[in-house]
Image (tube, rainbow, N blue to C red):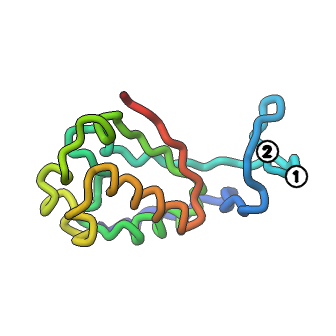
Amino acid sequence: LALSWLRPVRGAMLVPLSDLPLRVSGRHVVGKTGQPVHLACVNWYGAHMEQMASNGLNVKPLAAVAALIARFQFNCVRLPYSLDLIYDAPAQVPQASSMLAANKDLQSLSPLGVFDATVAALTSAGLLVVLNNHV
């Protein structure tokens, strides 16, 4: 997955753990100190769809995707999911060997396990995660 044409954006910074939890003050999102926090988010879809895993895990390792998001100075990821991950999920991601081709360590996990690993990789890279239930 070559993204050499994509240039880092300016202005977004990773939110330090010491600034969490975030809250709203008027029209601003602020950290623990009351200073405004600029959220620069990307959307990473897929876990709410029939494939039950975020897109791109067939071509890039999970940690590499998380690092790339942070490298381009985004500080949060909107991560849609479906309740099917919990209530109707099969034992493995459908077509796991192709859907998770670049992440062999995830292929034996349940869809919820893959989702948990995705959240863990994103937060380990210093990114905030906005969970979005798509029922």
Q: Position of residue 16 (x, y in %)?
A: 72, 63
Q: Is residue 64 left or right of residue 20?
A: left
Crowd class of label 1 (few under 14; some 14 to 19; many from 20; radius 10 Å)? few
Give the number of the disc on residue 30. 2
Q: Position of residue 119 (x, y in %)?
A: 46, 56
Task: Please give the label number shown on residue 33.
Answer: 1
The quarter holding residue 108 reads bottom left
Mark 1: secondary structure: loop
**How many labels sit on residues?**
2
* Quadrant of the frame with the N terminus: bottom left
Q: Is residue 87 above or below residue 21?
A: above
Residue for point 47% across, 62% down: 120
The amino acid at mark 1 is Thr
Q: Is residue 59 left or right of residue 69?
A: left
Do the residues under discs 2 and 1 have CB atoms within 8 angstroms?
Answer: yes
Residue 34 at x, y = what percent? Answer: 87, 46
Name the residue at 15% across, 49% down.
94
